[in-house]
Image (spheres, grey):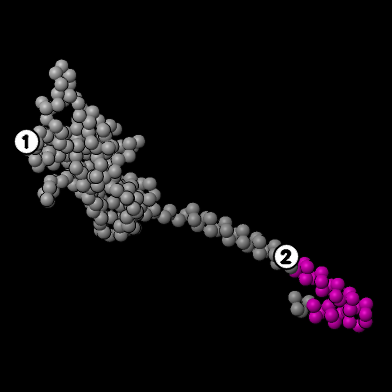
Amino acid sequence: MDTLITTLRDYFLPFGFLGILLFTICVLLVMVVWSYFSDFFKHRNAIALETHKAKLAKELPPKEKIEVQLEVKADLVLKHTDRNEVWLVINIINTGEITAYVKKIAAILEIDTHKIVGTDVGFTPDVSELTPKNQTTIEIKPHGAEHTRNLVIHRSYRFLIHENNGVKYGKGYVELTTGEKFEFEFSLLSEQTWDSVTQPDFIGEFSGKVPHKCSRCGFIFLMLNPALIAVEGKKAYVTCPNRQCNHVDAL
């Protein structure tokens, strides 16, 4: 382009002012035409490059999505401390290659299960789940890192049952912040084991009072001996002192 401009200058300069004017006009025309064709070829090359990239993307195999991989084990355990307690021990192991963020741990209950005041567990009636109090997001690193959560249970909850090879198990799940769920199962305790936990340490009668177990929530409390409060020809009744229950039992 520099050579072309030099040639035009040498051609038009002998014509004086008119030559200079004609030279300027020619230079402007050359620059406009040059810019037009330059932009045209740049645009065409850009389209060709994008087409080539799209073709390569179709030919390359898709990238594999790396997913969270958890191994969840749970068990109901009878713990002997200063008093008998049942713990639902939930162990979560991250066997994958990326960090897992757990937002919820829950055991599934039957719909008509109730909550006991003072326990280490909460109860959501609409979904019927047993969950730890004040759940926060749990970060579990990859490559074998683990987290164990213990739910202390003070009564015989009626867990949702499912059978595996003829054996009955309770069910629960671990939910990630992404919404993905990992289910787990756990063995159930016998009624005799639950009785050893829920029965009070006292036996017999204390100043005319005897232990009574609420038929609704299972709470055990002292009440007057029915023989002392019964009225002839009428039934005696007692109200559960558990404020979340207040069920009335006929004696």
Q: Position of residue 251 (x, y in %)?
A: 16, 25
Q: Is residue 55 visible?
A: yes
Q: Is disc 2 placed on a helix, strand or loop?
A: helix
Q: Judge left or right: residue 86 versus residue 174.
A: left
Q: Which residue is mark 2?
A: 37
User: What residue is pinned by disc 1?
Assistant: 204
Q: Quadrant of residue 33?
A: bottom right
Distance from the alpha carbon under mark 1 to that under mark 2: 106 Å
**Residue 2 rendering spot, x and y as whole percentages:** 75, 78
Q: Badge 2: how crowded within 10 Å, few (<14), some, or many (20+)?
A: few
Q: Residue at x 21, y 47 (%)?
A: 152
Q: Position of residue 201 (x, y in %)?
A: 9, 42
Identify the residue shown where x is 93% and y is 82%: 16
Badge 1 amino acid: Gly
The quarter of the rendered structure image containing the N terminus is: bottom right
- State the image quarter where residue 122 is shown: top left
Q: Quadrant of residue 124?
A: top left
* Residue occupying image coordinates x 19% and y 26%: 237
Residues rendered magenta in the picture? 5-34
The dominant secondary structure in magenta is helix
